[in-house]
Image (cartoon, helix red, strand yellow):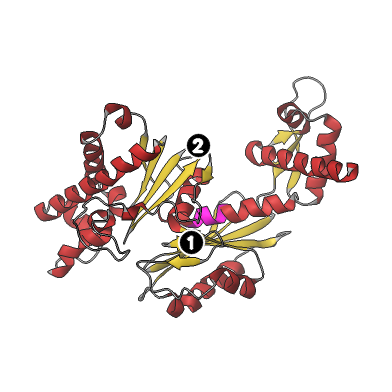
Amino acid sequence: MVIADQLLVKKMNQKVLLNEIVSNSPISRARLSEITGLNKSTVSSQVNTLIEKNLIFEIGQGQSSGGRKPVMLVFNKNAGYAIGIDIGVDYINGILTDLKGNIVFDQYHHLKKSSLDQNKDVLFSIIKELSNQIPDSPYGLIGIGVCVPGLVNTEQKVIFTPNIDWNYQLDLKSLIEKEFQVPVFIENEANAGAYGEKVFGAAKNYDNLIYVSVGTGIGIGIVINNDIYRGVNGFAGEMGHLTIDFNGLKCSCGNRGCWELYASEKSLLHNFQENGRITSNQELIHLANQNDPDVLMALQNFGFYLGIGLVSILNTFNPQAVIIRNELVEALPMVLNSIRNSISSRSNDQFTNGHELFLSSLGKNAPALGTSSIVIEHFLEMATA
């Protein structure tokens, strides 16, 4: 029992030290001892183990504060590489990152049909192409993260995708693991986007945040105390199906008057597409910049309805920050202004002033980077286990 306890303590110390080196490198052994409270012999022993594992390396001497110059330690971000995949309604976005989340290579493929069965070969082709770009490294491909716009349960199985034709008997996790022989993680798209912004983007300094992904539907990613909040079965955040009109339009989820029926890109484009006038976001953005009155009014209403749903979210979660990911909001400041006005007109000043409202800093790569960060965390956890 004593030996087992000692081994556990050593592993815990190793994790603590690696986390500090990842966050603060270059850093010396002496500084690590000061920050962690571990004695110098423990630091030296565990640092040597991390060097042997190729997770860190020495880069030479730093500045002295008196006495010998310290040897500086750096996290080896090129020890391995992660793949992050975002499967959207009409696209697959894939990225290859190092262990610090830097994108080394990316692949974007537009899909003609939103059917996973028909696009499985495209998915595998993208993963293979990303794998082929991995430089020589001690660990190579450490894992693959995949996110989808739908319900993912606690067993990482996709059980509902309202806007994608999906074979729910398909175990995507097992399928990819069998093909590529690495750990695979399946996540909801909005959760992945929230985590990407938390780890690598606009929300680094916030412990509690809401990420709002507005596309064909609306997905919400919730981070509470730095962790993704998934709920009991993994379905938390499906607030695109929050009712904003109790007698409203019928939704594919079975409800009526869902938020995304009024505030998604699909709803915005619907009326224009019916008369064949506008068929894409790019056309909307162009006409908005030309001051087309019909388009400007539609965008005003788009922001208004987004704000209505956000008021309920702010009242429910009281987050430090709300991050919006949407091409139109990012391209057209008037939409963000409309969202802000809608929120302020329906909220107490305490709610209005108690949060930050951001645009996504990672853009379309936020979900893929989120899945990549999940892969990296798992790898580093196992590497020090």
- Residue 151: horizontal and vertical position, in percent? 44, 61
> Which residue is situated farthest in the left direction here?
293
- Residue at the spot x=37%, y=40% of the render? 316
- Residue at the spot x=71%, y=34% of the render? 27
- Residue at the spot x=44%, y=74% of the render? 116
Of marks 2 and 1, which one's residue comes earlier in the chain?
A: 1
Q: Find residue 73 and name its label.
A: none
Check if mark 2's residue and mark 1's residue have beta carbons within 8 Å. Answer: no
Image quadrant in which you'd find residue 278: bottom left
Question: Would you place residue 379 above or below residue 112 in this image?
Answer: above
SS of the residue at dot 1?
Answer: strand
In this rendering, position of residue 384 left or right of residue 149:
right
Tell me the kind of residue under disc 1: Val
Question: Would you place residue 346 above or below residue 231 in this image?
Answer: above
Picture quarter with the N terminus: top right
| Residue numbers of the magenta segment | 368-373
> Which residue is situated farthest in the top direction here?
66
- Residue 300: horizontal and vertical position, in percent? 17, 47
Q: Measure the C-alpha gap from mark 2 to mark 1.
A: 23 Å
Crowding at mark 1 (Cα within 10 Å: few <14, some 14-19, many 20+): many
Tell me the kind of residue under disc 2: Asp
Crowding at mark 2 (Cα within 10 Å: few <14, some 14-19, many 20+): some
Question: Would you place residue 348 above or below residue 303 in this image?
Answer: above
In this rendering, position of residue 349 left or right of residue 300:
right
Q: State which mark lies toward you, 2 or 1.
A: 1
Identify residue for label 1: 152
Identify residue for label 2: 207
Could you tell me what secondary structure mostly forms the magenta stretch?
A: helix
Does 58 lie within the magenta span? Answer: no
